[in-house]
């Protein structure tokens, strides 16, 4: 075992800069949390307290009882879950094709999918509104699911393609020599190995759908509103009630954080794999 | 070998994704192009019709367009620039060995997964002119002598939104660069030590050149994302005060809400054209890597 040596230089070049970074990165969350548990009187007093003198869950109660925050939460959950399932299914099929087959137009189709990330959201926003209206799905969760696939499908294909390319072809080829069909080889061999990567990709899709605002504000109404739109609307309705807003913020970010910590390792690998290679 | 006959499987496998993307991306994109040549104002539905390049001429003569374009350039250059610098710094720190490093790496990424609306709200509350904590901190340290309404005055609103986007983007840069750092073989540094190189020489001769590719890809991705982002600015300032924080994306978003769709489409196409250059560079690089 090496003996830990506390050298001054180590404190100066490592611990102090790290502390500054983490205070900057995490303070907004701390402040949001502290605000959400402050009583109203303390919130709007001239004396700013860095930890509340009295803590209260009043803001959370108000959010659920007076504003029925559960409704946007269920809406968000539904949209994010369906987006995840749809995106994963179609992306996995496409990624498998790109990874395991060499076919005419492969490069062209890959370019088609990759360029999607380049289209500004605002370019698609207006025509998509018209298309959703014509399809009769405007203001339904389906409108959001479809518009989210504009960025979740290309991204999932890119990630899954990377994961698949890292698995040697000999894996399935061995099974196919033993008489398994390609489908069987995929389901029995590739799918189980790939599962953690699929989960990580799904977590990423879920998070983006859960967080999205620009499409959601245009394609939802009172009944189908998701959390980000509701949070923004809370400002307009009653001036600004920071206690409730921050409480809503904390509730929004908890599921995202939990998912992220589970998926983080694989997701990081997938995101950086393509870029690091060169 | 079955090389001769065309295998339909790959085409079948990509078709569901292709059909969806065709419907929700390519059809709308073509529609946007068509709309940009029309007088398409939902407030005057009777006068909808093709007007050639009039929208484009109007956009080019719109001082607000040029102002927003200039804001977009500043937003991207300053935003992404500082994200890179501070993200690089954080990656270098997180690459060192210290107690709790694993947790620190995960936790540092939280701003990146936070919803844009929430980022807007959190920082709006921090910047608040009456009860904001930033004013309190600056007053306590004696940096300012009276409270500043950061988001309500032109001089401070733009720097304030820039700080927010930097905060959001540091983690992604740090994540990507950290992955790159872990891929640099340690022997390179050992060899440099033998040759008596100092820290700066190692940074500029070994670290940065090895990370060239990852820095390039990350920067391109961030430029596109930052240029397209609407939710953070919109939830901080809605583009104000007096358009001082209105980038092109926010401008188009505001215009779309005002129902003048032809004009809004024209502007979004101009934005797309500006970003196209970035996109082409990015794609070229991706394919270069794919072929290897």
Image: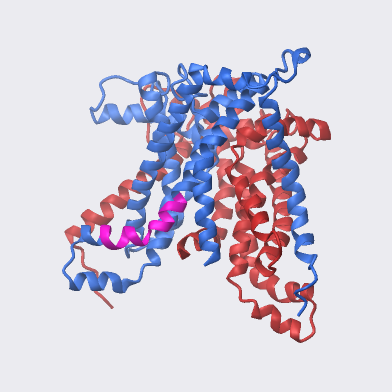
**Residue B223, image x and y in percent?**
47, 42
Q: Which residue is depicted at the point 38% across and 49% down?
A: B87
Q: Which chain is the one coloured red?
A: A
Total label count?
A: 0
**Toward the viewer: B107 or A146?**
A146
**Toward the viewer: A135 or B136?**
A135
Q: Which residue is depicted at the point 39% across and 18% down?
A: B153
State the residue lying farthest toward the bottom.
Answer: A178
Q: Is residue B49 left or right of residue A119?
A: right
Q: Is residue B201 left or right of residue A146?
A: left
Quarter assignment of residue A193 = bottom right
Instruction: Work out whether residue A220 can be spotted.
Output: no
Instruction: Work out whether residue A273 can be spotted.
Output: yes
**Residue B148, image x and y in percent?**
34, 21
**Residue A233, image x and y in percent?**
62, 26
**Residue A241, image x and y in percent?**
54, 25
Q: Which residue is depicted at the point 39% across and 66% down?
A: B182
Q: Is residue A234 left or right of residue A129?
A: left
Name above or below for residue A77 compared with residue B161.
Answer: below
Q: Is residue A138 magenta?
A: no
**Toward the viewer: A190 or A14?**
A190
Q: What shade has chain B been given?
A: blue
Name above or below for residue A94 compared with residue B185.
Answer: above
Residues shaded magenta: B203-218
Q: Which color scheme does this rendered protein use?
A: by chain
């Amino acid at each position: 075992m090496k003996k830990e040596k506390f050298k001054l230089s180590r404190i100066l070049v490592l611990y102090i800069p790290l502390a500054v970074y983490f205070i900057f990165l995490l303070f907004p969350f701390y402040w949001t949390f502290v605000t959400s548990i402050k009583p109203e009187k303390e919130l709007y007093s001239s004396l700013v307290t860095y930890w509340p003198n009295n803590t209260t869950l009043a803001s959370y109660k108000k959010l659920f009882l007076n504003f029925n925050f559960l409704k946007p939460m269920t809406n968000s959950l539904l949209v994010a879950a369906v987006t995840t399932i749809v995106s994963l299914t179609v992306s996995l099929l496409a990624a498998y094709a790109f990874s395991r087959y060499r076919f005419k137009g492969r490069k062209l189709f890959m370019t088609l999918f990759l360029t999607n990330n380049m289209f500004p959201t605002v370019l698609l926003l207006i025509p998509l509104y018209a298309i959703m209206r014509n399809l009769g799905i405007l203001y339904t969760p389906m409108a959001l699911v479809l518009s989210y696939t504009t960025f979740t499908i290309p991204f999932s294909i890119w990630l899954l393609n990377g994961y698949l390319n890292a698995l040697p072809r000999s894996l399935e080829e061995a099974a196919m020599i033993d008489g398994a069909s390609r489908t069987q080889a995929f389901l029995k061999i590739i799918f189980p190995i790939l599962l953690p990567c699929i989960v990580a990709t799904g977590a990423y899709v879920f998070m983006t759908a859960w967080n999205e605002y620009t499409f959601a504000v245009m394609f939802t109404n009172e009944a189908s509103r998701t959390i980000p739109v509701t949070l923004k609307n809370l400002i307009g309705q009653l001036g600004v009630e920071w206690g409730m807003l921050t409480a809503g913020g904390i509730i929004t970010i908890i599921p995202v954080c939990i998912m992220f910590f589970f998926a983080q390792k694989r997701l990081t690998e997938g995101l950086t794999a393509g870029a690091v290679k060169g | 070998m079955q090389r001769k006959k065309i295998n339909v499987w790959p085409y079948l496998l990509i078709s569901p994704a292709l059909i969806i993307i065709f419907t929700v991306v390519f059809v709308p994109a073509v529609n946007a192009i068509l709309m940009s040549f029309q007088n398409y104002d939902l407030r005057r539905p009777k006068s909808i019709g093709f007007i050639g390049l009039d929208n484009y001429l109007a956009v080019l003569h719109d001082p607000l367009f040029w102002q927003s374009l200039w804001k977009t350039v500043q937003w991207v250059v300053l935003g992404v620039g500082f994200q890179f610098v501070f993200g690089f710094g954080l990656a270098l720190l997180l690459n060192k060995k210290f107690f709790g490093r694993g947790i620190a790496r995960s936790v540092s990424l939280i701003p990146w997964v936070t919803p844009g609306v929430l980022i807007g709200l959190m920082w709006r509350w921090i910047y608040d002119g009456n009860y904001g904590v930033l004013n309190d901190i600056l007053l306590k340290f004696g940096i300012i002598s009276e409270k500043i309404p950061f988001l309500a005055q032109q001089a401070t609103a733009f720097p304030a939104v820039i700080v927010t986007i930097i905060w959001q983007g540091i983690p992604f840069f740090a994540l990507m660069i950290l992955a790159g750092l872990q891929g640099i073989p340690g022997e390179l540094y050992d060899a440099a030590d033998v040759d008596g190189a100092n820290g700066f020489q190692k940074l500029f001769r070994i670290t940065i050149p090895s990370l060239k590719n990852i820095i390039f890809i990350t920067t391109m991705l961030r430029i596109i994302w930052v240029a397209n982002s609407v939710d953070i600015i919109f939830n901080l300032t809605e583009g104000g005060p007096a358009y001082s924080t209105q980038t092109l994306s926010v401008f188009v978003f505001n215009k779309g809400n005002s129902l003048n769709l032809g004009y809004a489409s024209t502007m979004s196409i101009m934005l797309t054209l500006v970003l196209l250059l970035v996109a082409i560079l990015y794609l070229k690089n991706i394919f270069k890597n794919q072929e290897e």
